Image (tube, rainbow, N blue to C red):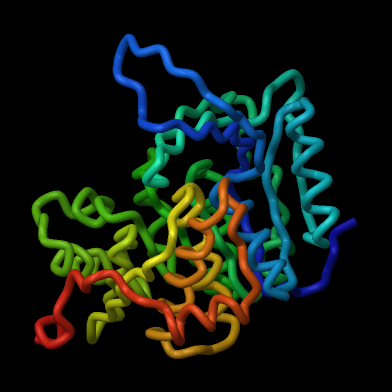
Amino acid sequence: MINQQKVDVVGVGLNATDVVIPVKEVPQRGAKIEVTAATTMLGGQVASAIIACRQWGLSTRYVGKFGEDHFAQLHRAEFGRLGVEAHLFSATGATSQQAYILVDESGERTILWKRDPRIKLLPGELQREWVTNAHVLHLDGHDTSAAVLAAKWAREAGVPVVIDLDELYPAVEDLLPNVDYLITSRDIPARIVPDEADLCRSLQEVLRRYRCRLAAATLGSQGVLAWDGSQFHYAPGFRVDVVDTTGAGDMFHAGFIYGLRQSWPLQRQLEFACAAAALNCMGMGARGGIQPVERIQHLMATGQRHPPLFDPAALRT
């Protein structure tokens, strides 16, 4: 039976099980190094963002697919424990997505991942009400056909679509016209607009081409740059003691969605998202540093920033 309750946010996209391995430095070819820990932790772009939104008090729904293994049971249990309405599919005989993440002493991570093609989420597995009975749809675009259908349903119902795009998946050009808040990793705008390497100009062209409400690029410790069609907004990153950068982008998007549901001004949304991402880097794993809203806001009010990458006066012109 379809749950008709309207939730704050529905996520359709990736989940993953991460084996996080701290190392002194990423090994060179032919090296042999000792590791002292290898911890299994839950992750995945959309799944982690939905978990964070739930922990901050939003009502949430998640739609995703697993294999038939112990890892799938871990995810199911975590969604259930936190009260996420979850619609989870299993692929017969398949294994769930898994990643091995090497985290060096600076907190930077190197990811080795594998994904069974049988756990691709299919359009026919979606139900329209899961999307339309939400205030926000969050995607990563990986299983593009399913994402395109969900985004079209959302657009028809007036549900804003947020996407965490860190790769240009096949047929993603069919998805982007139905995205409202296009928030990508640093290199994606110039890959969408290959004849424009300048980030400011490529963001402007992306928004013009796909008619988004917002085009933005996250810049790691340097924060985020966003173009809303009339002006740029920039938020520098916060200085924290970094343990592991895994999941920083997931938390940024969760923070952005949380601010969207609070109807905050865009600049405050970006500041909150940067602070949430920074704090998550102080813990191990994609979800290891999710902090309460109050602590995120305290960092916004008192935290030190990295040197700004952009001059606000220059951006205004």
* Quadrant position of the N terminus in the picture: bottom right
Q: Residue furthest right?
A: 1
* Quadrant position of the C terminus in the picture: bottom left
Q: Is residue 158 visible?
A: no
Which of the 4 image quadrants contains residue 27?
Answer: top left
> Residue at (83%, 46%) from the top-left corner?
77
Figure label count: 0
Residue 253 horizontal/vertical position (percent): 49, 64
> Residue at (43%, 17%) from the top-left corner?
33
Q: Is residue 223 above or below residue 301?
A: above
> Residue at (61%, 53%) from the top-left corner?
287
> Residue at (55%, 66%) from the top-left corner?
254
Residue 251 in the figure: left or right of residue 52: left
Residue 236 horizontal/vertical position (percent): 30, 73
Residue 52 horizontal/vertical position (percent): 64, 63
Q: Is residue 104 visible?
A: yes
Residue 119 in the figure: left or right of residue 266: right
Q: Is residue 191 above or below residue 264?
A: above
Which of the 4 image quadrants contains residue 69?
Answer: top right
Q: Say which of 95 and 91 sits in front.
A: 95
Q: Residue furthest top?
A: 30
Residue 267 in the figure: left or right of residue 3: left
Residue 207 horizontal/vertical position (percent): 27, 70
Residue 154 in the figure: left or right of residue 69: left
